[in-house]
Image (cartoon, rainbow, N blue to C red):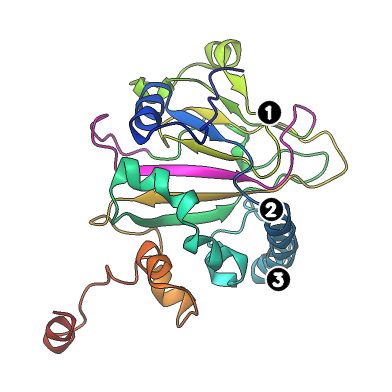
Amino acid sequence: MQIFREYKIFMTDKEFINKYNTDGMVLVNKLISTSLIKQFKNEIKIAIQKETEFHGSNKHKDNGMILCCVKYGGSFLKIFENDKLFKPFELILGKNCIVYSNASSSMPPRKSNYSKRIHIDCPIDYPIDFPLRMQCLILLDDFTNDNGATWFLPKSHKLKEKPNNSFFYENAKRLNAKAGSVFYLNPRIWHSGGHNKTDLWRDAFTIVMTREFCKQRMDIPNIVGKVNINEKAKKRLGFYNLIPKSYKDYYERK
């Protein structure tokens, strides 16, 4: 499936930028280790249970999604120290980009989920040559047709209107890729989740980054509080983009 081009070690920064801007997507294989995948999957299982307790049942519309993963710490926080993962974001959005949102995308056994509709993840109509957001999908399981591999319409970040269902499914591709792969995409790509026909959960983790002058979906620094992560991770999480709370706070930052 050539449209999901692999980001090879020998690819230059310029080549990555060109492929991303042309296709709206680039697939990077084997970026996340097997041990880290296991940690993510264990932590997602625990966090989903806590989300169920928060909502009072598993009948809520976002069942299987953790809306703000960093809230639960662990690998969700430490991943923000991974320079290899965040280099592509910095190539497109600049070195000072910060996280907009971070959520799990887990599909229950024998079901689909909230992602089933044909949609984009950023309704803001920004200039194509100055993107405000970029996202990645970290695959924590192999994505197959049987477990609901996502449908993506290549180059559709350039469309002005939503494609109709027949056009979408006649021209879209399935994201068939191995666990540990990272799929970078323009959040204005039209896509749809599949249907999980297996008896196992299919897990993924989504990170959306934005330019440093944009607001985050939530006040992430306030949500996570004091954390034991390096300075780059704090920067990516928006700790240094907070609005000063007072005159004193402003001048102490100078």
**Vertical relation: 82 (above or below) 125:** below
* Lateral position of residue 172 relative to residue 53, left or right: left
Disc number for residue 53: 3
For disc 3, the neighbor class at 10 Å (few under 14, some 14 to 19, many from 20) is few
* Lateral position of residue 160 relative to residue 10, left or right: left
Which image quadrant for residue 132? Answer: top left
Given the image, on which type of amino acid does mark 2 rest? Gly
* Residue 213 location (% of width, % of height): 23, 56
* Residue 138 location (% of width, % of height): 59, 46
User: What range is drawn magenta here?
Assistant: 123-146
In front of the other: 117 or 142: 142
Tell me if residue 60 is in the magenta stretch: no
Given the image, on which type of amino acid does mark 1 rest? Asn
* Lateral position of residue 17 relative to residue 108, left or right: left
The residue drawn where x is 74% and y is 62% is 45
- SS of the residue at dot 1? loop
The residue drawn where x is 74% and y is 38% is 142
